[in-house]
Image: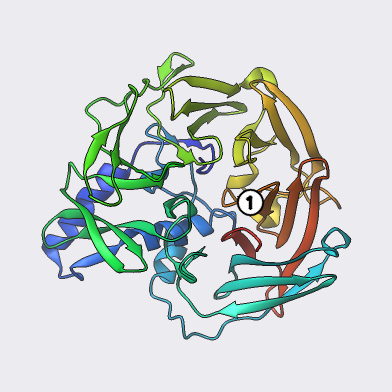
Amino acid sequence: MTDTRTGRVSDDTAPFEARLRLLYAELTAPPPLVDRSERRAQSQRFRSAGSTRLARRPWRLGAVALATGAALIAAVLLNRSVLDAQPVLAIDLQPAGASLSCKLPISAVSNNDTTGFIVMDHGQATFQQVKTDGTTYIPGLGIWASVLPQMVAPDGRAFVSDRLDYARKHELITITDARGTRTLLDTKVPDELMAMAYTANGSILVTGPSNSPGDWRIELLDPTTGRLSPLPFAMPSAPIINGVRVGSLGFYDRNSNAIWSGFFQGDNSTIWSVDYATGGMTQWFNPSDGKGTAQVVATDKHGAPIIQLSTSDAWHTDAAHRNGIAMQTMLMTAPHRFTVLNQGHTGERGVAGAFSPLSATSGNSIWFATDDGAIWLYRAGEGLKQIASVHTRNSGAPGIAISGPCK
């Protein structure tokens, strides 16, 4: 949601983006294939750097932009070399991390992108740098890939991505596993389909343009045969909020086996989910539960969402001017019922800042990161604790995105 995971009111720019790209293709001679998954992954990482607006279709919201991104910065990064000099990250382990022993994959945004593993070993922590342009660690393959985490198969042994073929004006959905990369689906713009996520049962959700702004077009793609099939239920229409139908499409979450979406306007936020097994829609949070900008930042192993509520939209506020914004981090125990895990004002000691939506749930553990270089861990029965602080030698705290669970 803005995954990302609830967002700000905006127009759906994706169809215009696709047409502009095709027009550009007619006027210039760009490469025949462009990996758009890399662009989405790089832009999504800047969601944690606290910049601005992202309009990538697997996260798109129609009237609601669920994610933010730094388009100009992302464009610069697309031209970066993985051989550029990389700043070394220093890890300050907090007392709560003293007993941990695992490797946490992260992507950090500083002067240059810094990707690798935070290696924690019973009170000691070091950074193990990896030279890659990938953003998500694929454990089953032992590689980094430029995709969002939901594009990785449940067993961690494959991932999907999309590419736009400018010359043919076609969208390609590809799958990469131990056998290599192959095309699963080839569709033509403007009726193209794009990969949205791997489901818990191993199917691939794909999404494409709809004839109605209040409806979602989602289908299933078989990762073995490339065959398309309908969802096992009729996708409900988007809800009506403040008298307006919100044509929004959020993100699929494997822990809850649901598609999550959200809407906010001013200090009024609404968050809902669509159960993938039944098609039932559930409203989890609305303005009666709290005023401000609400965003899903994770789900636990049972599928219960963790929501952050910010009184002043911390995700769209520059990190340098974010201190003093009131923030609550809540575990939703049921619709409209929650337990506060952490609260206070950003910048205060012990207060969790705005989490990146790129969290990682593994068993009883959920890993979070913020753009002030803080790493947090939630465990049921133990609560939410800061594990480490990350900083560079000469440019302060970088924005951090969790790139996989700590193993």
Instruction: Look at the picture and state if 235 lies above or below 250.
Output: above
Drawn side of residue 397 relative to residue 381, left or right:
left
Residue 81 percent coordinates (x, y): 43, 81
Instruction: Look at the picture and state if 361 lies above or below 239.
Output: below
* Number of marks present in the image shown: 1
Instruction: Look at the picture and state if 93 lies above or below 375.
Output: below
Residue at image mark 1: 362
Drawn side of residue 127 relative to residue 339, left or right:
left
The residue nearer to you, when weighing 300 against 242, is 300
The residue nearer to you, when weighing 136 against 82, is 136
Residue 16 percent coordinates (x, y): 25, 45
Q: Which residue is found at the position 21% from the left and 28% from the top? A: 211
Q: Which residue is found at the position 71% from the left and 80% from the top? A: 393
> Which amino acid, by three-letter code, is at mark 1?
Ser
Q: Which residue is found at the position 69% from the left and 57% from the top? A: 320
Density class for disc 1 (Cα within 10 Å; few <14, some 14-19, many ≥20) is: some
Q: Is residue 70 visible?
A: no
Q: Which type of secondary structure does the marked residue at label 1 adopt?
A: strand
